[in-house]
Image (tube, helix red, strand yellow):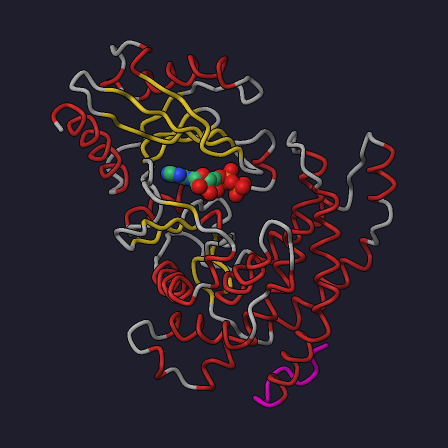
Amino acid sequence: MGAAKKIWNEMEVAAEARENGSTEFLSSPLIVDTSLSLPLMTPRVIALCKDLFKQWSKLDDSRFSVDTVSGGITNLLLKVTVKEESGNDVSVTVRLYGPNTDIVINRQRELQAIKYLSAAGFGAKLLAVFGNGMVQSFINARTLTPADMRNPKLAAEIAKQLRRFHQVEIPGSKEPQLWNDVSKFFEKASSLKFDEIEKQSMYETISFKEVQKEIVELKELAGHLNAPVVFSHNDLLSGNIMVNDEQEKLYLIDFEYGSYNYRGYDIGNHFSEYAGYDCDYSLYPNKDEQNHFFRHYLRPDKPEEVSDQDLEVLYVEANTFMLASHLFWALWALIQAKMSPIDFDYLGYFFLRYNEYKKQKEMCVSLAQSYLSRSGRGGHCC
Ligand SMILES: Nc1ncnc2c1ncn2[C@@H]1O[C@H](COP(=O)(O)OP(=O)(O)OP(=O)(O)O)[C@@H](O)[C@H]1O
Protein backbone atom coordinates (compact mmCIF):
# COMPACT_ATOMS: atom_id res chain seq x y z
CA MET A 1 0.00 0.00 0.00
CA GLY A 2 2.94 2.33 0.75
CA ALA A 3 2.40 5.99 0.11
CA ALA A 4 -1.28 5.59 -0.76
CA LYS A 5 -1.95 4.17 2.67
CA LYS A 6 0.11 6.96 4.21
CA ILE A 7 -1.94 9.67 2.51
CA TRP A 8 -5.13 7.92 3.48
CA ASN A 9 -3.96 7.56 7.07
CA GLU A 10 -2.99 11.21 7.26
CA MET A 11 -6.44 12.20 6.00
CA GLU A 12 -8.15 9.89 8.47
CA VAL A 13 -5.98 11.01 11.37
CA ALA A 14 -6.83 14.62 10.54
CA ALA A 15 -10.51 13.71 10.29
CA GLU A 16 -10.39 11.84 13.60
CA ALA A 17 -8.63 14.71 15.33
CA ARG A 18 -11.41 16.99 14.17
CA GLU A 19 -14.04 14.52 15.32
CA ASN A 20 -12.47 14.65 18.77
CA GLY A 21 -12.79 18.39 18.63
CA SER A 22 -9.03 18.99 18.71
CA THR A 23 -8.77 20.90 15.42
CA GLU A 24 -10.98 22.56 12.88
CA PHE A 25 -12.03 20.82 9.66
CA LEU A 26 -9.52 20.95 6.85
CA SER A 27 -10.98 23.75 4.82
CA SER A 28 -10.57 25.88 1.75
CA PRO A 29 -12.50 28.98 0.71
CA LEU A 30 -12.47 27.79 -2.93
CA ILE A 31 -15.80 27.50 -4.77
CA VAL A 32 -16.40 25.22 -7.74
CA ASP A 33 -18.96 26.56 -10.20
CA THR A 34 -21.63 23.86 -10.49
CA SER A 35 -22.90 25.20 -13.80
CA LEU A 36 -19.69 24.13 -15.59
CA SER A 37 -19.51 20.99 -17.68
CA LEU A 38 -17.47 18.13 -16.18
CA PRO A 39 -14.42 18.73 -18.48
CA LEU A 40 -14.34 22.42 -17.46
CA MET A 41 -14.98 21.61 -13.83
CA THR A 42 -12.28 18.93 -13.61
CA PRO A 43 -9.18 21.22 -13.38
CA ARG A 44 -10.93 23.26 -10.68
CA VAL A 45 -11.79 20.17 -8.66
CA ILE A 46 -8.17 19.01 -8.95
CA ALA A 47 -6.96 22.44 -7.79
CA LEU A 48 -9.38 22.24 -4.86
CA CYS A 49 -8.09 18.80 -3.83
CA LYS A 50 -4.50 20.01 -4.06
CA ASP A 51 -5.37 23.02 -1.93
CA LEU A 52 -7.07 20.88 0.71
CA PHE A 53 -4.70 17.93 0.86
CA LYS A 54 -1.12 19.12 0.92
CA GLN A 55 0.12 15.57 0.27
CA TRP A 56 -1.38 15.86 -3.22
CA SER A 57 -0.27 19.40 -3.99
CA LYS A 58 2.81 18.42 -5.98
CA LEU A 59 1.29 15.57 -7.97
CA ASP A 60 0.80 16.06 -11.70
CA ASP A 61 -2.80 16.71 -12.79
CA SER A 62 -2.67 13.62 -15.01
CA ARG A 63 -2.71 11.48 -11.84
CA PHE A 64 -6.23 12.72 -10.96
CA SER A 65 -9.42 11.47 -12.51
CA VAL A 66 -12.79 13.08 -11.80
CA ASP A 67 -16.10 11.31 -12.51
CA THR A 68 -19.72 12.03 -11.72
CA VAL A 69 -21.20 9.64 -9.14
CA SER A 70 -24.59 11.23 -9.10
CA GLY A 71 -26.31 14.43 -10.04
CA GLY A 72 -28.92 13.96 -7.30
CA ILE A 73 -31.89 16.25 -7.07
CA THR A 74 -30.01 18.35 -4.54
CA ASN A 75 -26.26 18.13 -5.08
CA LEU A 76 -23.61 17.08 -7.55
CA LEU A 77 -21.43 14.25 -6.30
CA LEU A 78 -18.03 13.61 -7.86
CA LYS A 79 -15.54 10.80 -7.35
CA VAL A 80 -11.92 11.90 -7.41
CA THR A 81 -9.34 9.16 -7.79
CA VAL A 82 -5.67 9.93 -7.36
CA LYS A 83 -3.04 7.60 -8.75
CA GLU A 84 -0.05 7.44 -6.46
CA GLU A 85 3.52 7.27 -7.66
CA SER A 86 3.47 3.71 -6.27
CA GLY A 87 0.60 2.90 -8.62
CA ASN A 88 -2.07 2.68 -5.88
CA ASP A 89 -5.36 4.55 -6.17
CA VAL A 90 -6.99 6.65 -3.45
CA SER A 91 -10.61 7.79 -3.94
CA VAL A 92 -12.68 10.47 -2.25
CA THR A 93 -16.05 12.03 -3.01
CA VAL A 94 -16.45 15.75 -3.60
CA ARG A 95 -19.97 16.95 -2.93
CA LEU A 96 -20.94 20.27 -4.51
CA TYR A 97 -24.00 21.79 -2.88
CA GLY A 98 -26.75 22.67 -5.33
CA PRO A 99 -27.39 26.42 -5.66
CA ASN A 100 -29.93 27.77 -3.13
CA THR A 101 -30.02 24.49 -1.19
CA ASP A 102 -29.18 26.37 2.00
CA ILE A 103 -32.81 27.55 2.00
CA VAL A 104 -34.02 24.03 2.76
CA ILE A 105 -30.86 22.59 4.34
CA ASN A 106 -29.22 23.88 7.50
CA ARG A 107 -25.52 23.31 6.66
CA GLN A 108 -24.30 24.10 10.18
CA ARG A 109 -26.70 21.51 11.57
CA GLU A 110 -25.51 19.01 8.95
CA LEU A 111 -21.80 19.50 9.72
CA GLN A 112 -22.39 19.19 13.46
CA ALA A 113 -24.34 15.97 12.91
CA ILE A 114 -21.76 14.45 10.55
CA LYS A 115 -19.05 14.94 13.15
CA TYR A 116 -20.84 12.83 15.76
CA LEU A 117 -22.50 10.36 13.41
CA SER A 118 -19.26 9.59 11.66
CA ALA A 119 -17.57 9.08 15.06
CA ALA A 120 -20.35 6.57 15.82
CA GLY A 121 -19.54 4.74 12.58
CA PHE A 122 -22.28 6.12 10.33
CA GLY A 123 -21.86 7.28 6.75
CA ALA A 124 -18.74 8.44 5.02
CA LYS A 125 -15.95 10.17 6.92
CA LEU A 126 -15.84 13.92 6.57
CA LEU A 127 -12.36 14.83 5.31
CA ALA A 128 -12.71 18.54 4.47
CA VAL A 129 -15.09 21.38 3.74
CA PHE A 130 -14.81 24.11 1.11
CA GLY A 131 -16.74 27.15 -0.18
CA ASN A 132 -19.68 25.22 -1.64
CA GLY A 133 -19.29 21.65 -0.54
CA MET A 134 -17.42 18.94 1.32
CA VAL A 135 -14.99 16.06 0.71
CA GLN A 136 -15.78 12.66 2.18
CA SER A 137 -14.37 9.16 2.05
CA PHE A 138 -15.56 6.98 -0.83
CA ILE A 139 -17.79 4.09 0.24
CA ASN A 140 -17.28 0.84 -1.66
CA ALA A 141 -20.84 -0.38 -1.77
CA ARG A 142 -23.92 -0.45 -3.96
CA THR A 143 -26.90 1.84 -3.51
CA LEU A 144 -30.16 0.17 -2.59
CA THR A 145 -33.13 0.18 -4.95
CA PRO A 146 -36.59 0.96 -3.54
CA ALA A 147 -37.47 -2.74 -3.97
CA ASP A 148 -34.43 -3.76 -1.85
CA MET A 149 -35.86 -1.90 1.12
CA ARG A 150 -38.73 -4.37 1.50
CA ASN A 151 -36.47 -7.41 1.24
CA PRO A 152 -37.02 -8.90 4.74
CA LYS A 153 -33.31 -9.39 5.44
CA LEU A 154 -32.39 -5.86 4.36
CA ALA A 155 -35.44 -4.35 6.07
CA ALA A 156 -34.34 -6.00 9.34
CA GLU A 157 -30.82 -4.64 8.91
CA ILE A 158 -32.10 -1.13 8.12
CA ALA A 159 -34.31 -1.26 11.24
CA LYS A 160 -31.37 -2.39 13.36
CA GLN A 161 -29.08 0.32 12.00
CA LEU A 162 -31.77 2.96 12.40
CA ARG A 163 -32.16 2.01 16.05
CA ARG A 164 -28.38 2.53 16.54
CA PHE A 165 -28.58 5.78 14.59
CA HIS A 166 -31.37 6.98 16.87
CA GLN A 167 -29.17 6.29 19.89
CA VAL A 168 -26.43 8.72 18.82
CA GLU A 169 -26.33 11.82 20.96
CA ILE A 170 -25.71 15.10 19.18
CA PRO A 171 -24.91 18.05 21.45
CA GLY A 172 -27.20 21.04 21.42
CA SER A 173 -30.96 21.42 21.56
CA LYS A 174 -32.94 18.18 21.68
CA GLU A 175 -36.16 19.83 20.60
CA PRO A 176 -37.92 18.04 17.72
CA GLN A 177 -37.55 20.14 14.59
CA LEU A 178 -40.44 18.80 12.51
CA TRP A 179 -43.00 21.52 13.15
CA ASN A 180 -40.39 24.32 13.18
CA ASP A 181 -39.19 23.16 9.77
CA VAL A 182 -42.71 22.71 8.42
CA SER A 183 -43.63 26.18 9.60
CA LYS A 184 -40.48 27.74 8.05
CA PHE A 185 -41.18 25.92 4.79
CA PHE A 186 -44.83 27.02 4.91
CA GLU A 187 -43.86 30.69 5.28
CA LYS A 188 -41.63 30.51 2.21
CA ALA A 189 -43.77 28.16 0.15
CA SER A 190 -46.94 30.22 0.58
CA SER A 191 -45.45 33.48 -0.69
CA LEU A 192 -43.80 32.50 -3.97
CA LYS A 193 -44.15 34.13 -7.36
CA PHE A 194 -43.23 32.29 -10.54
CA ASP A 195 -42.09 34.05 -13.71
CA GLU A 196 -43.52 31.30 -15.90
CA ILE A 197 -47.29 31.84 -16.42
CA GLU A 198 -48.08 28.10 -16.42
CA LYS A 199 -46.26 27.51 -13.17
CA GLN A 200 -47.85 30.55 -11.56
CA SER A 201 -51.37 29.45 -12.49
CA MET A 202 -50.74 25.92 -11.23
CA TYR A 203 -49.34 27.40 -8.00
CA GLU A 204 -52.44 29.57 -7.61
CA THR A 205 -54.66 26.47 -7.47
CA ILE A 206 -53.15 25.62 -4.07
CA SER A 207 -55.19 26.69 -1.04
CA PHE A 208 -52.61 27.63 1.58
CA LYS A 209 -55.43 28.24 4.02
CA GLU A 210 -56.32 24.58 3.67
CA VAL A 211 -52.67 23.48 3.93
CA GLN A 212 -52.24 25.53 7.10
CA LYS A 213 -55.37 24.00 8.62
CA GLU A 214 -54.01 20.53 7.86
CA ILE A 215 -50.70 21.39 9.54
CA VAL A 216 -52.37 22.75 12.68
CA GLU A 217 -54.68 19.73 13.03
CA LEU A 218 -51.99 17.15 12.41
CA LYS A 219 -49.60 18.85 14.82
CA GLU A 220 -52.25 18.75 17.51
CA LEU A 221 -53.10 15.11 16.92
CA ALA A 222 -49.43 14.05 16.79
CA GLY A 223 -48.75 15.98 19.99
CA HIS A 224 -51.13 13.70 21.89
CA LEU A 225 -49.01 10.68 21.00
CA ASN A 226 -46.12 11.81 23.22
CA ALA A 227 -43.81 10.21 20.69
CA PRO A 228 -40.16 9.67 21.64
CA VAL A 229 -37.71 12.18 20.18
CA VAL A 230 -34.35 10.97 18.84
CA PHE A 231 -31.72 12.21 16.43
CA SER A 232 -33.38 11.30 13.12
CA HIS A 233 -32.05 10.88 9.61
CA ASN A 234 -35.29 12.33 8.14
CA ASP A 235 -34.54 11.31 4.54
CA LEU A 236 -34.11 7.55 4.54
CA LEU A 237 -34.84 6.77 0.91
CA SER A 238 -33.14 3.96 -1.01
CA GLY A 239 -30.56 6.35 -2.50
CA ASN A 240 -29.36 7.11 1.01
CA ILE A 241 -28.72 3.49 1.94
CA MET A 242 -25.76 1.54 0.61
CA VAL A 243 -24.76 -2.08 1.12
CA ASN A 244 -21.58 -4.00 0.61
CA ASP A 245 -23.01 -7.45 -0.11
CA GLU A 246 -19.74 -9.38 0.45
CA GLN A 247 -19.08 -7.78 3.81
CA GLU A 248 -22.82 -7.66 4.58
CA LYS A 249 -22.32 -4.09 5.71
CA LEU A 250 -25.06 -1.51 5.46
CA TYR A 251 -24.40 2.24 5.32
CA LEU A 252 -26.88 5.03 6.06
CA ILE A 253 -25.57 8.11 4.24
CA ASP A 254 -26.44 11.75 3.53
CA PHE A 255 -27.42 13.51 6.75
CA GLU A 256 -28.49 16.77 5.12
CA TYR A 257 -31.91 16.71 6.74
CA GLY A 258 -30.84 15.12 10.04
CA SER A 259 -32.21 16.69 13.23
CA TYR A 260 -33.80 15.81 16.53
CA ASN A 261 -37.22 14.57 15.60
CA TYR A 262 -39.92 12.02 16.36
CA ARG A 263 -38.75 8.42 15.80
CA GLY A 264 -42.13 7.71 14.18
CA TYR A 265 -41.45 10.46 11.68
CA ASP A 266 -38.17 8.90 10.59
CA ILE A 267 -39.82 5.50 10.20
CA GLY A 268 -43.02 6.76 8.53
CA ASN A 269 -40.94 8.83 6.13
CA HIS A 270 -38.84 5.76 5.32
CA PHE A 271 -41.98 3.69 4.63
CA SER A 272 -43.23 6.40 2.23
CA GLU A 273 -40.03 5.90 0.27
CA TYR A 274 -41.05 2.33 -0.57
CA ALA A 275 -43.03 4.11 -3.31
CA GLY A 276 -39.75 4.60 -5.18
CA TYR A 277 -38.86 7.23 -7.72
CA ASP A 278 -42.17 6.76 -9.56
CA CYS A 279 -44.06 7.60 -6.36
CA ASP A 280 -46.21 4.48 -6.56
CA TYR A 281 -47.78 4.70 -3.11
CA SER A 282 -49.50 1.35 -3.54
CA LEU A 283 -46.05 0.03 -2.55
CA TYR A 284 -46.37 1.45 0.97
CA PRO A 285 -45.58 -1.45 3.34
CA ASN A 286 -48.53 -3.42 4.72
CA LYS A 287 -49.01 -4.07 8.42
CA ASP A 288 -47.01 -7.32 8.41
CA GLU A 289 -44.09 -5.67 6.65
CA GLN A 290 -44.24 -2.77 9.08
CA ASN A 291 -44.35 -5.09 12.08
CA HIS A 292 -41.32 -6.97 10.76
CA PHE A 293 -39.47 -3.64 10.66
CA PHE A 294 -40.71 -2.60 14.12
CA ARG A 295 -39.63 -5.91 15.70
CA HIS A 296 -36.07 -5.49 14.48
CA TYR A 297 -36.07 -1.82 15.41
CA LEU A 298 -37.34 -2.43 18.94
CA ARG A 299 -35.50 -5.66 19.79
CA PRO A 300 -32.72 -6.43 17.27
CA ASP A 301 -31.52 -9.26 19.52
CA LYS A 302 -34.95 -10.87 20.11
CA PRO A 303 -37.37 -9.55 17.48
CA GLU A 304 -39.95 -12.25 18.28
CA GLU A 305 -40.26 -11.06 21.85
CA VAL A 306 -41.65 -7.61 21.05
CA SER A 307 -45.07 -7.23 22.66
CA ASP A 308 -48.22 -6.53 20.63
CA GLN A 309 -48.64 -3.36 22.63
CA ASP A 310 -45.21 -2.01 21.63
CA LEU A 311 -45.92 -2.91 18.02
CA GLU A 312 -49.18 -1.00 18.13
CA VAL A 313 -47.59 2.12 19.63
CA LEU A 314 -45.00 2.26 16.87
CA TYR A 315 -47.58 1.46 14.20
CA VAL A 316 -49.67 4.43 15.27
CA GLU A 317 -46.63 6.73 15.52
CA ALA A 318 -45.18 5.77 12.13
CA ASN A 319 -48.48 6.09 10.27
CA THR A 320 -49.45 9.39 11.87
CA PHE A 321 -46.06 10.93 11.17
CA MET A 322 -46.09 9.47 7.65
CA LEU A 323 -48.77 12.11 7.02
CA ALA A 324 -46.42 14.80 8.33
CA SER A 325 -43.70 13.61 5.96
CA HIS A 326 -46.05 14.15 3.01
CA LEU A 327 -46.67 17.73 4.17
CA PHE A 328 -42.96 18.35 4.77
CA TRP A 329 -41.83 17.17 1.31
CA ALA A 330 -44.80 18.79 -0.42
CA LEU A 331 -43.81 22.21 0.95
CA TRP A 332 -40.13 21.48 0.30
CA ALA A 333 -41.01 20.78 -3.33
CA LEU A 334 -42.72 24.15 -3.73
CA ILE A 335 -39.61 25.96 -2.52
CA GLN A 336 -37.47 23.86 -4.84
CA ALA A 337 -39.83 24.64 -7.74
CA LYS A 338 -38.87 28.27 -7.33
CA MET A 339 -35.24 28.05 -6.18
CA SER A 340 -33.65 24.98 -7.74
CA PRO A 341 -31.91 25.22 -11.11
CA ILE A 342 -32.43 21.47 -11.56
CA ASP A 343 -34.83 20.44 -14.28
CA PHE A 344 -37.32 18.42 -12.24
CA ASP A 345 -41.09 18.79 -11.97
CA TYR A 346 -41.08 19.96 -8.36
CA LEU A 347 -44.51 21.54 -8.69
CA GLY A 348 -45.91 18.21 -9.87
CA TYR A 349 -44.16 16.59 -6.89
CA PHE A 350 -45.99 18.94 -4.51
CA PHE A 351 -49.32 17.66 -5.85
CA LEU A 352 -48.19 14.02 -5.69
CA ARG A 353 -47.29 14.33 -2.01
CA TYR A 354 -50.21 16.55 -1.01
CA ASN A 355 -52.77 14.36 -2.78
CA GLU A 356 -51.32 11.26 -1.15
CA TYR A 357 -51.57 13.07 2.19
CA LYS A 358 -55.25 13.73 1.57
CA LYS A 359 -55.82 10.14 0.47
CA GLN A 360 -54.25 8.65 3.60
CA LYS A 361 -55.43 11.25 6.08
CA GLU A 362 -58.75 9.77 7.12
CA MET A 363 -57.43 6.29 7.74
CA CYS A 364 -54.34 7.42 9.67
CA VAL A 365 -56.19 10.00 11.73
CA SER A 366 -58.87 7.53 12.78
CA LEU A 367 -56.16 4.97 13.62
CA ALA A 368 -54.48 7.52 15.92
CA GLN A 369 -57.76 8.71 17.43
CA SER A 370 -59.02 5.23 18.25
CA TYR A 371 -55.61 4.39 19.81
CA LEU A 372 -55.71 7.59 21.87
CA SER A 373 -59.25 7.00 23.10
CA ARG A 374 -58.43 3.39 24.03
CA SER A 375 -55.36 4.49 25.95
CA GLY A 376 -57.33 7.27 27.64
CA ARG A 377 -55.21 10.08 26.17
CA GLY A 378 -55.99 13.18 24.13
CA GLY A 379 -59.72 13.18 24.90
CA HIS A 380 -60.64 16.29 22.93
CA CYS A 381 -58.16 16.09 20.15
CA CYS A 382 -59.37 16.91 16.63
N1 LIG B 1 -19.34 8.61 0.21
C1 LIG B 1 -19.89 8.01 -0.85
N2 LIG B 1 -19.21 7.02 -1.47
C2 LIG B 1 -19.72 6.42 -2.57
N3 LIG B 1 -20.91 6.74 -3.13
C3 LIG B 1 -21.63 7.70 -2.55
C4 LIG B 1 -21.16 8.39 -1.38
N4 LIG B 1 -22.09 9.31 -1.04
C5 LIG B 1 -23.09 9.21 -1.94
N5 LIG B 1 -22.84 8.23 -2.84
C6 LIG B 1 -23.70 7.85 -3.98
O1 LIG B 1 -24.22 9.03 -4.56
C7 LIG B 1 -25.65 9.04 -4.51
C8 LIG B 1 -26.15 10.44 -4.17
O2 LIG B 1 -25.63 10.81 -2.92
P1 LIG B 1 -26.37 11.77 -1.95
O3 LIG B 1 -27.71 11.21 -1.60
O4 LIG B 1 -25.47 12.07 -0.83
O5 LIG B 1 -26.57 13.05 -2.88
P2 LIG B 1 -27.75 14.05 -2.96
O6 LIG B 1 -27.37 15.09 -3.93
O7 LIG B 1 -28.09 14.50 -1.58
O8 LIG B 1 -28.92 13.23 -3.58
P3 LIG B 1 -30.45 13.49 -3.43
O9 LIG B 1 -30.65 14.95 -3.40
O10 LIG B 1 -31.02 12.84 -4.65
O11 LIG B 1 -30.82 12.83 -2.12
C9 LIG B 1 -26.01 8.01 -3.45
O12 LIG B 1 -27.25 7.44 -3.74
C10 LIG B 1 -24.90 7.01 -3.57
O13 LIG B 1 -25.17 6.14 -4.65
Q: Position of residue 7 (x, y in %)?
A: 20, 26
Observer able to see residue 106: no
Observer able to see residue 267: yes
Q: Is residue 9 left or right of residue 318?
A: left
Residue 110, image quadrant: top left
Q: Position of residue 298 (x, y in %)?
A: 38, 74
Rendered residue at 43%/14% (across/down):
44
The span picked out in magenta is 374-382
> Is 320 drawn above or below residue 114 in the view shown?
below
Q: Is residue 377 magenta?
A: yes
Q: Assign the C terminus to one quadrant of the image.
A: bottom right
Rendered residue at 65%/48% (across/down):
184
Residue 161, image quadrant: bottom left
Q: Position of residue 117 (x, y in %)?
A: 34, 49
Q: Nearer the viewer, residue 378 or 296?
A: 296
Q: Nearer the viewer, residue 70 or 97?
A: 70
Q: Assign the N terminus to one quadrant of the image.
A: top left
> Is 177 drawn above or below residue 217 in the view shown?
above
Rendered residue at 60%/49% (across/down):
277
Q: Is residue 79 left or right of residue 246?
A: right
Q: Quadrant of ligand 1?
A: top left
